[in-house]
């Protein structure tokens, strides 16, 4: 089995960033929208200047943003990817794609319309991310959806030639259940946090379980 790509999201402090930048993650995510994990691009730049990128790709997460806001963060941080996590219009994503070189990640909430939305956003999306649908929240809830249904998203993304990450409620003690679906990528935040901050022990435990499972399959 090929190891899924790993994205550690919601880094909101210098210590969070230090741990994530020294981890085995492929992507590090920063939330630039209303959230308990919100941070500012100028703050993130200070962390990068201190610790470097260590080969990690950086993803900025936005919910229904103005294009100028996204482009300003891209300029300050030289982001590798932008994750649109709301109900952004297709024209907005198309315009961003025309004007910028960053990868576009489109988060879609798990519900009966998700596959249709994947098809709609497909032409201007580089990476899909399927997250739990929790009323009143755009993400970061720590709630998992029924991963036995993940295969339908992974299959559609594969047919479109695009990677698909699974998010929502992933943690060290349940990641092997998700790995059975063979996702292209895994995105998590709260599952590697203790008291709201990234935790070295949980990170290490999570990575061990992922790498042990992959090496055994």
Image: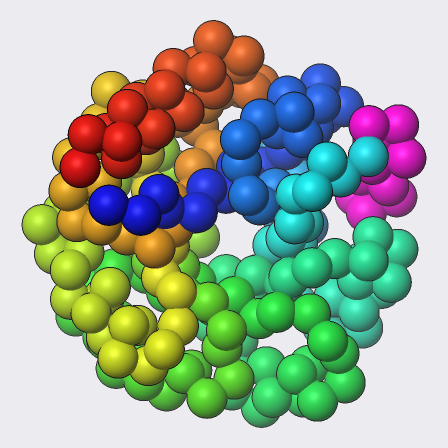
Q: How many numbered badges does the structure rendering display?
A: 0
* Residue 47 sits in quarter: top right
Tell me if residue 51 can be seen.
Answer: yes
- Colour mapping: rainbow
Give coordinates of residue 1: x percent, y percent. Answer: 24, 45
Residue located at (65% from left, 25% from top): 22
> x%, y% of residue 193?
48, 20
Which is nearer the eye, 11 or 133? 11
Q: Decide if residue 152 is on the left or right side of residue 57.
A: left
Q: Which image quarter: residue 128?
A: bottom left
In the rendered image, the vertical position of residue 49 relative to residue 3, given as above or below: above
Q: Is residue 77 left or right of residue 187?
A: right
Q: Residue at x 41, y 83 (%)?
A: 122
Is 54 inside the magenta-drawn segment?
Answer: no
Using the rendered image of the protein, determine whether residue 135 is visible from the camera's viewpoint. no
Q: Which residues are magenta?
A: 40-51
- The quadrant the C terminus occupies is top left
What residue is drawn where x is 27% and y is 35%?
214
Magenta-colored stretch includes residue 47:
yes
Identify the residue shown where x is 49% and y is 77%. 125
Image position, residue 115 (x, y; %)? 23, 75
Q: Where residue 215 appears, x then y in whole percent?
A: 27, 31
Near-viewer residue (28 or 208): 208
Q: Main secondary structure of the magenta part?
A: helix
């Amino acid at each position: 089995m090929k190891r899924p790509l790993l994205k550690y999201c919601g880094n909101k402090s210098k210590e969070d960033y230090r741990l994530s930048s020294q981890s085995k993650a492929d992507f590090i995510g920063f939330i630039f929208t209303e959230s308990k994990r919100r941070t500012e691009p100028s703050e993130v730049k200070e962390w990068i200047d201190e610790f470097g990128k260590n080969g990690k790709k950086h993803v900025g997460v936005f919910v229904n943003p103005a294009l100028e806001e996204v482009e300003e963060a891209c300029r300050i941080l030289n982001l590798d990817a932008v994750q649109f996590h709301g109900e952004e219009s297709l024209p907005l994503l198309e315009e961003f794609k025309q004007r910028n070189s960053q990868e576009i990640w489109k988060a879609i909430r798990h519900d009966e319309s998700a596959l249709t939305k994947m098809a709609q956003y497909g032409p201007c999306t580089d990476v899909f991310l399927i997250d739990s649908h929790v009323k009143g929240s755009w993400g970061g809830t720590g709630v998992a959806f029924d991963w036995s249904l993940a295969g339908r998203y992974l299959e559609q993304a594969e047919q479109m030639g695009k990677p698909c990450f699974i998010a929502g409620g992933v943690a060290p003690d349940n990641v092997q259940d998700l790995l059975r679906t063979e996702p292209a990528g895994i995105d998590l935040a709260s599952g590697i946090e203790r008291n709201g901050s990234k935790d070295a022990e949980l990170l290490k435990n999570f990575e061990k379980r992922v790498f042990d499972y992959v090496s055994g399959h």
